[in-house]
Amino acid sequence: MSENHRYNFLDSSRGLAAFVVLLAHTIKTFLPDHFSSSFDFLWDSEAAVLYFFILSGFVLTESVSKIKLTPLSYFNFICKRILRIYPVFLVVLLITFFLFPLISSQNHNWLSEYWKKSPDLYDLFKQAILIFRIPNDPALRLLPHDWTLSIEILISLALPFLAWISRKNSLFLIVIIIAAVKLLPIDNFIFDFSLGCIISTQKEKLISGWKKINFLGHAFLLFLSLTIINLDAFLPIGPQNLDAFMIHFKSWGLAILLIAVISSTGFQNLLNNKFLVFQGKISYSFYLIHFILIAILSQFNPEISFPFALTIIFLTTIILSATTYYIIEKPCIQVGKKYFTGQKGQ
């Protein structure tokens, strides 16, 4: 299995997670009575975001796996992360600033929780910093869902060190991360990145172990994964209590799912579908853009049927995301690879 092959199917899995987030937000806006139902596991946006973080931990650890941790390699790593996250974020943020009048008068659904304050240029500047969330309240930010980007940036600062510890002793890493989350005022999403980090450093053993298991064993692990992800539906103690015990209970199931994806050629063949790969490559822009499009459509046509709303939002998000990917994201990735690794971007 080549590195490029691996990169493609992991992209596809990220794209599917981004679609789950879009689906959840669209249902919550245009089909709110059905948002909480027996089928809501199909649009579990919380699980999708946790998968983003686990996958980021895996992919970023892969990217530094053959690089010695030095001040220069750390500097290069951080520069590439900045070039990966900030440029398209700043463009979408600026566009949203000018579109604010079109999205700020939500008064009939859950979106009315957001865009509580009309921003000025100083607000735009503060929100552009991202790593320091000023203001932190999503209701006062132009992009309410940009909290995930803040976490990506902040935990990226620690990722090379997490990867170094995991290469030395993965068990030690998970023990100290759980202890740190429990005992210190540290963001608990570092746990999810650490799971991805551990899967990366132990991937050869995990893949070998998966291949030794028969079909029934694979089916059991997948069933176990889905059961853990939806554990709050089976146990009466509630998701907050589960998280208090397991940090993020869904992440344990999602980690099993990622192991299945990196180990199973069957999953990889499915995910290497050209459209899924394409959507995966544009998934960052897709995630950033979709929420604003939902708000605009909700403002202009709140009574539109759900199928039409989903179709319009999905297709428009795909078109705009592809545009920002080829004009902004891809060139910035190439700059990062050229100047901070000496490699030409793919």
Image: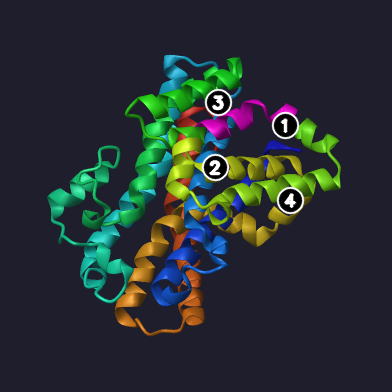
Residue density around tag 1, few if under 14, some if 14–19, many if 20 or more, within 10 Å: some
Q: Secondary structure at mark 4?
A: helix
Amino acid carrying mark 1 in the image: Leu
Q: State the residue at coordinates (46%, 50%).
A: 238
Q: Which residue is mark 3?
A: 64
Q: In this picture, which residue range is highlighted in magenta?
A: 194-206
- Magenta region's main secondary structure? helix
Q: Residue furthest front?
A: 236
Could you say which quadrant of the image residue 118 lies in? Answer: bottom left
Residue density around tag 4, few if under 14, some if 14–19, many if 20 or more, within 10 Å: some
Amino acid carrying mark 3 in the image: Val
Separation of marks 3 and 4 at Cα, in angstroms: 25 Å
Amino acid carrying mark 4 in the image: Phe
Tell us which disc is closer to us: 3 or 4: 4
Above or below, comparing residue 121 to residue 243 in the picture: below
What mark, if any, has residue 206 been given in the picture? 1
Residue 156 locus on image (x, y percent): 43, 32
**Screen quadrant of the C terminus:** top right
Q: Earlier in the sequence, mark 2 or mark 4?
A: 2
* 121 to the left or right of 85: left
Tell us which disc is closer to us: 1 or 3: 1
Separation of marks 2 and 3 at Cα, in angstroms: 23 Å
Q: Which residue is mark 2?
A: 251
Q: Earlier in the sequence, mark 4 or mark 1?
A: 1
Residue 239 or 42: which is nearer the viewer? 239
Q: Earlier in the sequence, mark 2 or mark 3?
A: 3
Q: Secondary structure at mark 1?
A: helix
Q: Is residue 198 magenta?
A: yes
Tell us which disc is closer to us: 4 or 1: 1
Task: Please indicate, yes or no, whether residue 249 appears anywhere in the rendered image.
Answer: yes
Q: Secondary structure at mark 2?
A: helix
Q: Which residue is mark 4?
A: 267
